[in-house]
Image (cartoon, grey):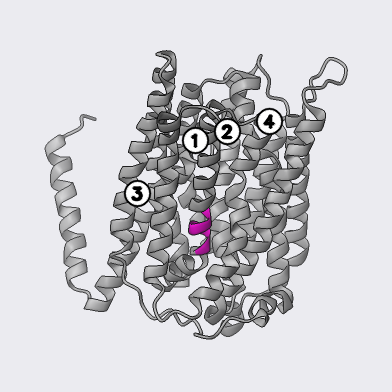
Amino acid sequence: MRFDPAWFVRRTIERRKIKADALAGMDPHEQRVHQGRRNFVIDNISAYVIVTICAGSYLAGLLQYAGVPDELNGLILAIPVLAGAFQIAGALVSQKLNSQKTFVVSGIAIQRFCLSVIFFYPLIFGPGLLASVMMVLTYAIGFLAGTTVGPSAGNWLVSLVPSGQRAKYFSYREKLSLLFVAAATVVASQFLDRFRAADMIVIGFASIGAFLMIFTVVDVIHVSRIYEPHSGIEKRRASLSDIAEPLKDATFRKVIVVLVLWQASVQLAVPFLGLYFIDNIGISYSMIGIVALIITVERALIVEIWGKLAERSTWENVLKLAILIFASSQFMLFFLNRNNFIWFYPLTQVVSGIAWSVLNIGFFNFQYQFIKPSRSTVYIGVCGAISGIAGFVSALAGSGILNAVGSGGIGRFDVSGHRILLLVSSFISIALFLYMHLNFRKIRSPEEKELS
């Protein structure tokens, strides 16, 4: 079957016209809500690109170039999780605001700018202590700002997307974001490998910084244009009882345990894998980028299937299945080595990609099922703070294990510190699956109680 460009152009124009006519038929409020959802999609795309590049092998290579030891490298990559502790402060501040838009936009702007500018530091300061300190401080400030406004941003988004539309909307948003991330990671990988081959990797890092700065500007412009409906949040003065309220909720305490176990599983091992793949296993940036492209496309294709499954079942069931798949991928990485990485590394990432295609949106929706709408920012803030601290403690434990074990061996098989972390991470994930299976089978969300 031959591709007809003229037919494709006509079909695209017709579809755009149909969408434009549908938008024109909406009342002004519906139009603002619709445009707000679209701008949140653009925000998510920008955030995914920036955070993905600032949370993996690219940032690990930047920190290594600046002279940061491997053990500290992994801890620095875990800063975003520790920054979650400040969600409580953000949630309490948001309660006193008539409008949360300025608060959220400011936090997003600071976060995206900080994550972009750190890639310029090696060019400005050169490798060494000053560049390392500046990177860590700027990285921390960026994620502190982003996580502080996280509960308010989540509540703002939820106010524009009714619960019945969330599975379809989030899967669509995730799909587009992943496709953009796929392209961005390939570009970033090519920058780094080509400039590293020319012994000019510092220029490669600066190029990535300029690339991310473009996304930052686009993101801030679109978020600032999003319509903010009445949030429904109770305006009240902050007090300690606000923090205690989610902890007194027996059902939500179980939600907190779920997030604590999840962060412990991920942060124990994942922050240390970037340099492990590059230095210990010998995988190149280009291979990481190509595999990331394939996996991201895979995730974009699979996420809609997950969304449909969530509509027919529940987010708990979807998450339980995804967690088991994640545990399997972590266990598989235990057997990765220099002799098999050419085929085994892509295989492990394919399995991991199946799980990661739904884990982020799954946990987001899972929390909101068990939250009082009028108290959502406080509930999310407390949950994010506790799970964030747990995740950072796990990263500390991971760093300690790497420092204590190093590269050891049992018989003919190399059981290094990284492999121990992967094994423990998979066991924690299995424990999380069992906890959810035992504790959420008979629990109903507030929405389900209202319908019954």
Q: Earlier in the sequence, mark 4 or mark 2?
A: 4
Q: Earlier in the sequence, mark 1 or mark 3?
A: 3
Q: Secondary structure at mark 3?
A: helix
CA–CA distance in space, label 1 to label 3: 24 Å
Residue at point 74%, 54% (across, down): 432
Region in magenta: 143-148
Quadrant the C terminus occupies: bottom right
Q: Which residue is mark 4?
A: 333
Quarter occupied by residue 109: bottom left
Q: Position of residue 70 (x, y in %)?
A: 65, 30
Q: Residues within 10 Å of mark 3 (few under 14, many from 20)?
A: many
Q: Position of residue 342 (x, y in %)?
A: 58, 18
Nearest to viewer (mark 3 / mark 2): 3
The amino acid pointed to by label 4 is: Leu
Marks 1 and 2 in Cβ contact (< 8 Å): yes
The amino acid pointed to by label 3 is: Thr
